[in-house]
Amino acid sequence: MTQLRPLVPLAAAFLLAGCGGGGGPAGVASAVVVAPSAAPVVTPTPIPAPTPTPPPAPAATPAPVATPVAAAPGVQSVVYVGNDVPDLAAYEAWLGRETDGVQLFSGRNGWADWSDSIGWLADRWKNVARTHYWSIPLFAEGGTLAAAAAGDYDSRWRAAAAALLANSPGDSTIAVRTGWEFNGDWQPWAAKGKEADYRAAYRRFVASFRGVSGRFRFEWTPNLGDFGTNPEDSYPGDDVVDLIGMDFYYKHEWDPADPVAAFNYKVSERYGLAWHQDFAARHGKPTAYAEWGVSRDSDAPYVTLALAWFAAHKVVYASYWNSNADYSGKLSDNQYPLVASAYRTLLAGK
């Protein structure tokens, strides 16, 4: 994701259920009324930079039938719908089932936005009983990896942890990822040539959060592909990573046009899906896909293969980008009816 842009504060009533924000068991509904607030929240933009060398377009092959994610025990179906609460209820009504979790992004447009958006967003979602997967920027715009590694932001991280903890009732774990897509060049914490600072900054972030509570769990998330740095050089250590994630999108500008060939390339390319699973296995860590999406109605076979991959590898969760904010991946508006049909069938049997 690149730059962030403002989002109008949310306001709505809805029925939802789960564990991350509310601490309750999945499937237990509770009514929540969210009042308007003046505090701004931002919407992330997910566009990763292109892989330097476009792959050749191999011949198309038939797509296998995927195991429905809903039928794969332990694989959580998660979604990003923006930071507006009613959109989750609308998405679930369209899908025909409750989600297992939501991906939430706090802001980074200066330190005031970085700090205030965390508490504001956590307060709005605290009674939304779904697992909350928090994407907390490593630092605000204008920050640096060197300063983060030196400890300049430790107090800010502790305050953010306290805000999340205060708005996370119960004793369930609180899932946090930071410094995602570090191996590309579009994030302010881009690690190429600064791998040591990235590792140190990530470790200090985790130490700061753990100093507030032992409930936090941490995800380390490279972007799929080779951007001139080996992601392994930025791995901060098994003691500060609980989950190894990956972000990937079907980008027709440089991925093969055939959706089956495109997904197969995602698997086999350097630092692709196969590497991700192998690296995690070598470190004894579970895996997840915090961001994935498609952007054409011809992409249904790709979706089928992606869901099959998640089920076969027993990932903790996979979060679909159900938004048109900077990547046109939204399915619930039926702009891609064939893809939407495949997705709903595999996830909800609809």
Image (cartoon, rainbow, N blue to C red):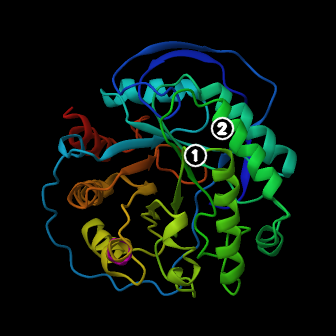
Q: Nearer the viewer, mark 1 or mark 2?
A: 2
- Is residue 200 placed above or below 24 in the rendered structure? below
For the C terminus, the quadrant is top left
Classify mark 2: residues with Cα within 10 Å, few (<14), some (14-19) or many (20+): many
**In-front residue for pair 54/179:** 179
Label 1: element kind: strand
For the point 58% across and 46% down, which residue is it? 134
Q: Pointer 1 and pointer 2: residues touching (CB < 8 Å)?
A: yes
Image-based side of 2 in relation to 294, left or right: right
Q: Is residue 324 left or right of residue 110?
A: left
Residue that label 2 marks: 164
Q: Is residue 270 visible?
A: yes
Query: For mark 1, what is the residue?
Result: 134
The image quadrant of residue 162 is top right
Amino acid at circle 1? Trp
* Residue 67 coordinates in the image, percent (x, y): 16, 51
